[in-house]
């Protein structure tokens, strides 16, 4: 397992590198955004931890460029508490998870392990429900052979539904998985995103796959 750390605080880099190597990971480090991007584009990592405020290109731009290049390596963003961006932005530009500084090393290692697992599973196989196909590695979606453009958040929501095909998922579960564990915002955001998704994957095809489960939430399945 190979991890890339993109972080400009050299004491933190040394500490992370030592700790992750002790866990059996191979670790490369980049101290600025441009070097981080160059290494990330090699596509040879199982996970990337990415700081936001970096010399050169910032973490947000690095993450966006990685995704633009079609690289699906899981990204964990390290966000500062008083940063100018918020965590929702991190997920919207294609990060898979975020951790707020200062963080405990135990939590960081646990999150990286979870990401590597998820990434490994994701690269495995396409998800299919009827004529709807989602490819986690290519981050592509198509229905009846027509390719469909989704935002990173819509993609994450659809992926979660398709991973649990036939199973009713509550809004709280959706928010926990697709937004963040212990999401404290408005539950309606799940509804809003389901509506966005339906507009793209269901409405044009006439045979809706996303079902509303009254009093519970949503389920995806073929009739
Ligand atoms: Ca920094």
Image (cartoon, helix red, strand yellow):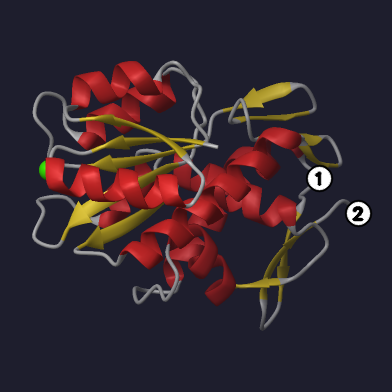
| Relative vertical location of residue 33 with respect to residue 217 in this rendering, above or below | above
Image coords of residue 138 (percent x, y): 61, 25
- Residues at discs 1 and 2 in contact (Cβ within 8 Å): yes
Residue 55 horizontal side relative to residue 212, left or right: left
Q: Residue at the right extreme?
A: 223
Of 83 and 206, nearer the camera is 83
Residue at 51%, 22% (x, y): give it: 44
- Position of 167 with respect to 119 (left or right) is right
Which residue has dot 1 on it? 207
Residue nearer the viewer, 164 or 147: 164
Is the residue marked by circle 2 packed among few (<14), some (14-19), or many (20+) residues within 10 Å? few
Ligand 1 contact, mark 1 (Cβ < 8 Å): no
* Relative to 169, 54 lies left or right: left
Q: Position of residue 131 (x, y in %)?
A: 83, 35
Quarter in which the N terminus is drawn? top right
- Circle 1 — which element? loop
* Cα distance in 3D space between marks 1 and 2: 9 Å
- The quarter of the image that holds ligand 1 is top left
Task: Please give the residue where the numbered disc 2 appears in the rendered image.
Answer: 223
Mark 2, secondary structure of its residue = loop
On the image, the x and y values in percent for residue 69 come to: 43, 17
């Amino acid at each position: 397992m190979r991890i890339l750390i993109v972080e400009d605080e050299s004491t933190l880099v040394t500490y992370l590198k030592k700790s992750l190597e002790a866990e059996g990971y191979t670790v490369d480090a980049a101290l600025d955004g441009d070097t981080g991007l160059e290494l990330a584009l090699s596509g040879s990592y199982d996970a990337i931890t990415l700081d936001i405020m970096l010399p050169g290109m910032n973490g947000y731009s690095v993450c966006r460029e990685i995704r633009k290049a079609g690289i699906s390596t899981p990204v964990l963003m390290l966000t500062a508490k008083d940063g100018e961006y918020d965590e929702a932005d991190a997920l919207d530009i294609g990060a898979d998870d975020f951790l707020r500084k200062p963080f405990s090393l135990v939590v960081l290692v646990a999150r990286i392990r979870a990401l590597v697992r998820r990434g490994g599973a994701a690269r495995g196989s396409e998800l299919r429900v009827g004529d709807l196909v989602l490819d986690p590695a290519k981050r592509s979606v198509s229905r009846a052979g027509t390719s469909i453009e989704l935002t990173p958040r819509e993609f994450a929501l659809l992926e979660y539904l398709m991973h649990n095909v036939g199973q009713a998922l509550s809004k709280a579960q959706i928010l926990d998985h697709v937004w963040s564990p212990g999401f404290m915002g408005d539950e309606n955001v799940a509804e809003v995103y389901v509506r966005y998704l339906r507009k793209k994957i269901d409405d044009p095809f006439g045979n809706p796959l996303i079902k509303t489960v009254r009093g519970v939430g949503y389920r995806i399945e073929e009739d």
